[in-house]
Image: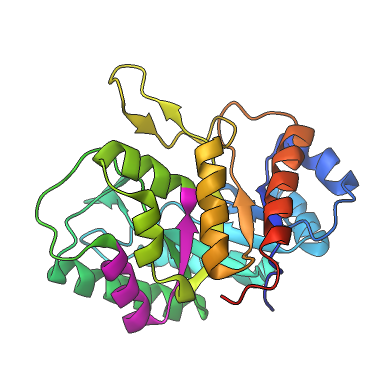
């Protein structure tokens, strides 16, 4: 099963009634599996209802694939249970680390892109895909400051990772924009160099200026998508053709109708990209 190249919305429980009443065609939903890793009760009942009505994408935040240690086998088993229960169209995670020595951190952290890191992450992705019995996609990170020790560019690293593991890539256009602004690099050049043939999904989100550091942008997911990000998205689709596109909002969550309005913008841009070959 593949996902149609339409726009989806990150599901929030407070929107449940509106979601089930929604008549927008080809709507799909993204959920964070960590919120549904329970043995029963209303959360699983809601998840079952969503899975019976909409195509789902599971977007994880806790595998810590760039960490020093392999993914937690207990969580991999729970994640597989959710995958088998919901039969999602897509499963994705982040190119980042978030745990150390058994402690989980509330962030997605960067790492030096070394040959050693590539080998380690290839092993972790292979373990994950084997444990889940399916392909996953990895999301490009947001960056807030330069770090030393890179032996690969990010686009080359992702291309080699996809080549060695067969994983897909999730291209977060807002992450590209935020990183380029923070590091003083070229967002369009990043898109030009990205291994677009491996992309399975695109993410769009809002960002915000840091409250203390002037000029720093934070991938906050708590604002409307900026016009510059919409423009970069249009530029990306000129190269890929229509792609499944997710509207993310995780803070200051607005009404469902506001999210649908952003979805309609994405739908119109997707329509303009119709007919182009990825």
- Check residue 170 for magenta coloring: yes
Q: Quick one: quadrant of the C terminus?
A: bottom right
Asked if residue 44 can be seen in this view, the reply is no
Q: Main secondary structure of the magenta part?
A: helix
Q: Residue furthest top?
A: 212
Q: Residue at x 45, y 70 (%)?
A: 196
Tell me: residue 35, above or below residue 158: above
163 vs 192: above or below: below
Nearest to the observer: residue 28 or residue 278: 278
- Above or below residue 205? Residue 88 is below
Boundaries of the magenta span: 155-173
Q: Quadrant of the N terminus?
A: bottom right
Q: Quadrant of residue 230?
A: top right
> Is residue 243 among the parts visible in the rendering?
yes
Tell me what residue is drawn at x 14 percent, y 70 percent. 116
Left or right: where 135 falls relative to 55: left
Magenta-span inclusion, residue 164: yes
**Who's the residue at 33% across and 44% down the image?**
180
Horizontal relation, residue 214 to residue 149: left or right: right
**Apparent side of residue 48 relative to residue 235 in the rendered image (left or right):** right
Residue that protrudes farthest toward the left in the picture: 149
The image shows residue 27 at horizontal and vertical percentages of 77, 56
Percent x, y of residue 125: 36, 72
Residue 169: x and y, percent?
45, 67
- Total of numbered circles in the picture? 0
Question: According to the image, what is the colour scheme of the structure?
Answer: rainbow
Does residue 92 appear to the left or right of 108 in the view shown? right
The image quadrant that residue 26 belongs to is: bottom right
Task: Provide residue 19's location: percent of width, then percent of height.
Answer: 81, 45
């Amino acid at each position: 099963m593949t996902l149609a190249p339409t726009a989806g919305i990150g599901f929030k429980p407070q929107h449940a009634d509106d979601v089930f009443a929604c008549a927008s065609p080809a709507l799909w939903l993204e959920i964070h599996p960590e919120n549904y890793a329970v043995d029963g009760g209303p959360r699983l009942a809601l998840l079952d209802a969503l899975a019976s009505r909409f195509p789902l994408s599971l977007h994880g935040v806790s595998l810590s694939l760039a960490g020093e240690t392999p993914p937690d086998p207990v969580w991999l088993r729970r994640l597989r249970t959710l995958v088998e229960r919901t039969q999602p169209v897509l499963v994705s995670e982040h190119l980042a680390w978030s745990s150390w020595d058994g402690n989980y951190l509330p962030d997605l952290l960067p790492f030096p892109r070394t040959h050693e890191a590539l080998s380690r992450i290839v092993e972790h992705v292979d373990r994950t895909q084997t444990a889940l019995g399916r392909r996953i996609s990895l999301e490009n990170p947001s960056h807030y400051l330069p770090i030393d020790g890179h032996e690969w560019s990010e686009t080359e690293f992702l291309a080699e990772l996809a080549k060695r593991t067969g994983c897909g890539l999730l291209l977060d256009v807002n992450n590209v924009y935020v990183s380029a602004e923070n590091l003083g690099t070229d967002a369009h050049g990043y898109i030009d160099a990205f291994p677009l043939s491996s992309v399975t999904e695109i993410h769009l989100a809002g960002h915000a200026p840091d409250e203390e550091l002037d000029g720093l942008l934070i991938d906050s997911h708590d604002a409307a998508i900026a016009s510059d990000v919409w423009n970069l998205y249009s530029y990306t689709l000129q190269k890929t053709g229509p792609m499944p596109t997710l509207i993310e909002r995780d803070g200051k969550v607005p009404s469902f109708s506001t999210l649908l309005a952003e979805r309609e913008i994405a739908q119109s841009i997707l329509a303009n990209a119709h007919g182009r070959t990825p």
